[in-house]
Amino acid sequence: MLVSLTAALGAQPRAADAAGFALIEQSASGVANAFAGAAASAEDATTIFFNPAGMTRLPGKQVLAAVNAIGPSINFTNQGSTLAPPQPATPLTGGNGGDAGSWSYVPNLYLSWQVDDSLWVGLGVNAPFGLHTDYTPGWVGRYQALNSELTTVNVNPTIAYRVNDKVSLGVGLSAQHADVTLSKAIDIGTICFNTPGLGQATCTGLGLTPQSVDGAQQLQANGWGYGYNLGALFEIAPDMRVGVSYRSRIQYTLSGTSAFSNVPAPLNASPQLQTSAATLALTVPDSASVSVFQIYDEKWDMMADMTWTHWSVFNQLAVQYADGAPASVTNEGWRDTWRFSLGLDYKLDEKWKIRSGLAWDQTPVPSPQLRTARIPDNARTWLAVGASWHFTEGAALDVSYAHLFVANASIDHSEPASGVLIGTYSSSANIAGLQLSYRF
């Protein structure tokens, strides 16, 4: 089962629906509460991701499998995009790129095992980061982005220890695999005009003028990175608990190939258009959370969460080429962010629980100039609902739904030889989750 789920995780494209390119959708029960109280709830084995110390609240053994279907909509409206200097400020041709979002499926698996009265061990397999934007060929921003995909698979063995009736501690290790695909169109006419020794007469004689012929570049790279997660759970009172957790940053050096296609024969020898081995440096951020879970009475539970993410470690996206070509560097300049959430549960009876949640997720993108077509991120507000059904002893089924209202996002992003993309993004997302857990 673990092998098949890992393969499924690796095969699925991702659509990030936490801020930046993070994926918070590591359970379906959590979606229903907009992940309020995630580090303190400890109601099922998904606590392995959010706070491993929470395993001490899970008696016996538990296995849990979940999948979240994420459907983002990402639509661009051009508002005066142009070629980049040193070319004249000529309008970029092409349409708006269609809907760059598409449905993706994020599965996860958790196993928790109580060894004795004080010790628990667990394993989580999930996808903490991901991205998928895909524009139609020929769109106005094609020289900056066509397809962008980031897929991660995180294998997270954990251990938890109950210090006493009030305090539990947890720790885990993360072995995380990342796979990146980045493609864009190449303005062959502009490259021809800027290639020494060819000259304007040669380029126009070949029918190569700016925006007249497009080639394509695609980078594919992958690799492993390693990190850890820590957590503590405090039983403040019989009806209240507080959880704190931390997930470390992970640094990657991804290796792969940068390949070109649709290059006219006279430019095959151009240093700018050579297929080459390439490496991509990527750092995914660390994060810290504080959560509260409060039992109000026999019917109502309340929860809250505050999470900080260290997005400023994502300062640039730099690709180095083995053939000595100049590095391709995109300045990101992201800032650290906060996420705040509130949740409310109502127990209908011993078998049914209705869940709800509200969250606000800050964007790490600080300005229109640093917003890119690959990650046109902005702040979002979550509204979420769901239900848990304990249909037999030890077994539960969770369903959830969340709608994300994403603020309109301006972009005024310039890249050398790729143009200045000027316009507005309007986005939203829907998330539907299904989860099955069994305790034995």
Image (cartoon, rainbow, N blue to C red):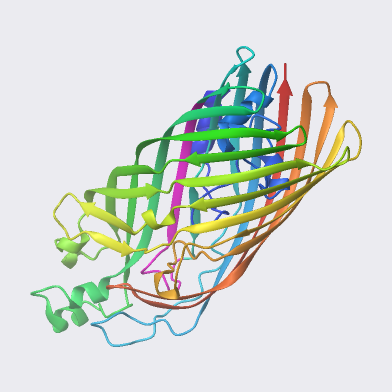
x and y, in percent, of residue 278 in the image: 24, 49
x and y, in percent, of residue 301 in the image: 80, 43
x and y, in percent, of residue 213 in the image: 31, 73
Residue nearest the observer in this picture, 236 or 414: 236
Left or right relative to 175: residue 432: right
Find the magenta span and give its range. 137-157
Determine if residue 40 is in view.
no
Left or right relative to 141: residue 428: right
Residue at x-position 26% and y-position 75%: 189
Residue at x-position 20% and y-position 74%: 192
Q: How many marks?
A: 0
Residue nearest the observer in this picture, 263 or 13: 13
350 lies above or below 149: above
17 lies above or below 215: above
Residue nearest the observer in this picture, 355 or 233: 233
Q: Quadrant of residue 199?
A: bottom left
x and y, in percent, of residue 139 in the image: 45, 72
Quarter of the rendering occupied by the C terminus: top right
Residue 140 among those drawn in magenta: yes
Quarter of the rendering occupied by the N terminus: top right
324 lies above or below 426: above
Determine if residue 198 is in view.
yes
Residue nearest the observer in this picture, 78 or 240: 240
Report the residue that reaches farthest toward the left: 197
412 lies above or below 42: below
Residue 24 among those drawn in magenta: no
Report the residue that reaches farthest toward the right: 349
Left or right relative to 40: residue 10: left
